[in-house]
Amino acid sequence: MGMAPIAHVLWGKYMKYNPSNPKWWNRDRFVLSNGHACALQYVLLHLSGFKEYSMEQLQKFRQVGSKCPGHPENILVDGGIEVTTGPLGQGIGNAVGLAIAEAHLAASFNKPDFEIFNNFTYVFCGDGCLQEGVSCEASSVAGHLGLGKLILFYDDNHITIDGETDLSFSEDVLKRYESYGWHTQFVADGDNDIAAIAAALEAAQKVTDKPSIIKVRTTIGKGSSKQGTEKVHGSPLGAEEIVKVKKLFGFPEDKSFYVPDDVKQVYDQIIPKGQAAEDKWNDMYKSYSSKYPKEAAELARRMSNKLPENWRSCLPTFKPEDAAKATRQHSETVINAIAGTIPELIGGSADLNPSTLSYIKSSGDFQKGTHEGRNIRFGVREHGMASICNGIMGYGGLVSYGSTFLNFIGYAMGAVRLSALSHFGVIYVMTHDSIGLGEDGPTHQPIESLMAVRATPNILLLRPADGNETSGAYAVAIESHSRPSVLALSRQAIPNLKGSSIEGVFKGAYVLQDAEGGKPDVSIVGTGSEVSLAVEAAALLQKDHNLKVRVISMPSWELFREQSSEYQQSVFLEDVPVLAVEAASHVGWGEFSHASVAMHSFGHSGPAKDVFIKYGFTAKNVSEKALKLVDFYKGRKAGSLVVKPF
């Protein structure tokens, strides 16, 4: 209610969009970062003529099956909601990503007299958004990059759930944003001064070298007896109070979900206005396509989420005799091979390029004034980086990636979770993936991180064992447009393995090395750097105990679960005991193994080799544990690990 005047000015007069075609490429983007205010956005979508937002849908607000959930969700509708917001501050980060995408695509495809991309990104936010750290990180990036088409409306209503904001939030927000490099304005009466809101918006549109924030003083719950208090923040007004509000504003007291005729007349103009704007753009794009057919074809491919034909041919392959390298080094090789074939790939690291090796060498930096660059310098801002990557993916035509140490995915997990919920195929390049990073010790050694990702729905955790599997991991990630991927890569060098393959990664797990002479006595399954350890242990078991050992590489639990039951049973054989090896948490391995060599504590600081020895990640210890497992199951049925009742 408090932001309704701002929303009316923006949606009713200034925002460029076509409800008849919600996916028009050059539409202005709108993000509601304070997603709990979503009823306002749903009403605007309904009034403006978005077909999916019928009166029936509004009446099902926050009900199961409704397209109007308690916070905006982009996957429930075909347009109108650009990104999924709700966790406060995320929308600001998403909006920065949307603005980066617009700037990059404009720099890449616009020609003189052909502004294919020139839209604004508008954001609504509240006090809570500005208190969350993710918004601070993303806003700092936006100011540094000079994103002039990003305009943020700050609903300054002085109320949070606890009460008055001065209980915990007394800073001068505009001074902070001025220090970030933003253009700042203040509207003192957002309840009534429509002209001032419009003037501030027009002024912000004219500032092209920096993003803008407009602080608007409003009254929460305007018109109710609870206005201006925390009591109206998240609680329904109640039937009696609603009647009073209707009476105050001149609405029929006995009607609900009622739209007056004069309101309809105003918003009935939106569709023809939007259609005219798109028609004009379409005429321009037709001429553009005629004059620049190569660029138009490339743009059409990207915006339809299609990959270049035979794109996998660019993926490097490796042989066992090739030099042992860390998978982060293989990742550098692969990402630079892909970058030439897939020009829509854009991203960067959280100030860790020398360590994560994620820099695209064939491109420059995305900086203020050089928006054609594909390398984004996110700075030491993991959470902001992930949130920005979501916005880039939400725009269309680009594939974003962000990189840091795997342990610090915890800093970014709020946005990573939204990647999965939003069906955004962001690629997270996470290096230093186990206790194998060594000297930095337990503060940097990820123990629970793999399981935290694996426990998250609609996300792929890919932990490649060598160069071929690293290529395979990128192939899976690039082709998983509606599912994010986390690539867990080693710091330490590991050998290229006989039998490894790109194709095997797509299966999630495969037999890397099989037993000779019949059914295996035991299977050893590993991921990442521990697969080579499993191979060494298998050799010891065969040599010293004449055991038949199957070695299984399992780069992705999620992909393996998606295979047929027949394939799963061909990898994990019935009544063959399985030992898992992973230099991270043991949690979860009970699904695929009878026992495990894994971590039950935090790690230790020291050279990687010594840390591995301390925690039992040696061929000798793994072979001894496998031998004990074989002895335990003598005379017992190991059963089938992968046959599920439903």
Image (cartoon, rainbow, N blue to C red):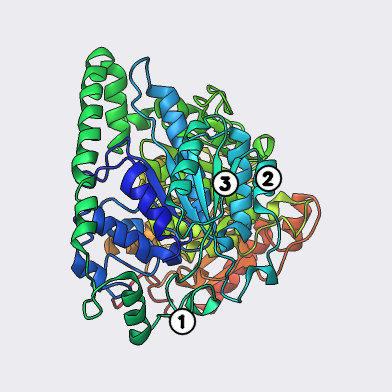
Q: Position of residue 457 (x, y in %)?
A: 42, 64
What amino acid is found at the position of numbered circle 3 in the picture?
Met
State the residue in front, 51 or 200.
Answer: 200
Q: Earlier in the sequence, mark 2 or mark 3?
A: 2
Work out whether residue 405 or residue 186 is closer to the camera in this orientation and state it: 186
Residue at 50% over, 66% down: 219
Cα–Cα gap, marks 1 and 3: 54 Å
The residue under label 2 is: 380
Report if residue 400 is visible in the image: no
Disc 2 to disc 3, C-alpha distance: 9 Å
Residue 635, which numbered label?
Answer: 1
Amino acid at dot 2? Val
**Measuring 48% from the left and 57% from the top, which residue is drawn there?**
33
Q: Nearer the viewer, mark 1 or mark 3?
A: 3
**Pointer 3: what residue?**
385
Task: Provide residue 2's location: percent of width, then percent of height.
Answer: 45, 64
